């Protein structure tokens, strides 16, 4: 997301890599390439409204209608661990 900073400059931050603590590694780059290629293939084949992701090591398309508006419960123990580690 681009943000205006004093002096009129713009900067771009990729939050995912910042949260994990560094620059993208080989896995991140390969994942991005595979996901991007699969998204282009889906569009070229006329499939729209799908989420492209990796599941069990393979590319999977999931219709957005299956995931939009659906809530996923939070693991209370994992949430507590993140709260403790964030101190």
Image (tube, grey):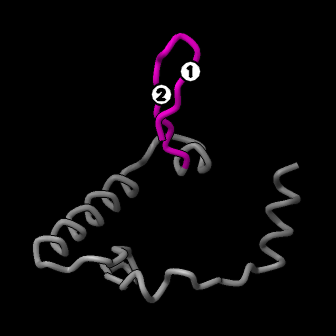
Q: Which residues are magenta?
A: 1-15
Above or below for 12 versus 59? above
Nearer the camera: disc 2 or disc 1: 1
Badge 2 density bin: few <14, some 14–19, many ≥20, Cα 10 Å: few
Q: Which residue is mark 2?
A: 11
Q: Answer whether residue 6 is magenta in the image.
A: yes
- Which residue is most to the bottom? 66
| Element under disc 2 | strand
In the rendered image, residue 55, in percent from the top left (x then y), is placed at 40, 81
In the rendered image, residue 30, in percent from the top left (x then y), is placed at 30, 58
- Which residue is most to the left? 44
N-term mark: 2 or 1 = 1
| Residue at 54% over, 51% down | 16
In the rendered image, residue 50, in percent from the top left (x then y), is placed at 32, 78
* Front position in the image: 21 or 72: 72
Q: Which mark is residue 5?
A: 1
């Amino acid at each position: 997301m681009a943000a205006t900073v004093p002096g009129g400059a713009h900067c771009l931050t990729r939050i995912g890599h910042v949260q994990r603590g560094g620059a993208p590694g080989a896995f991140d780059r390969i994942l991005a390439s595979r996901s991007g290629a699969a998204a282009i293939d889906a569009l070229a084949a006329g499939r729209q409204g799908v989420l492209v992701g990796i599941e069990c090591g393979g590319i999977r398309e999931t219709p957005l209608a299956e995931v939009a508006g659906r809530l996923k419960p939070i693991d209370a123990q994992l949430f507590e661990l993140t709260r403790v580690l964030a101190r």
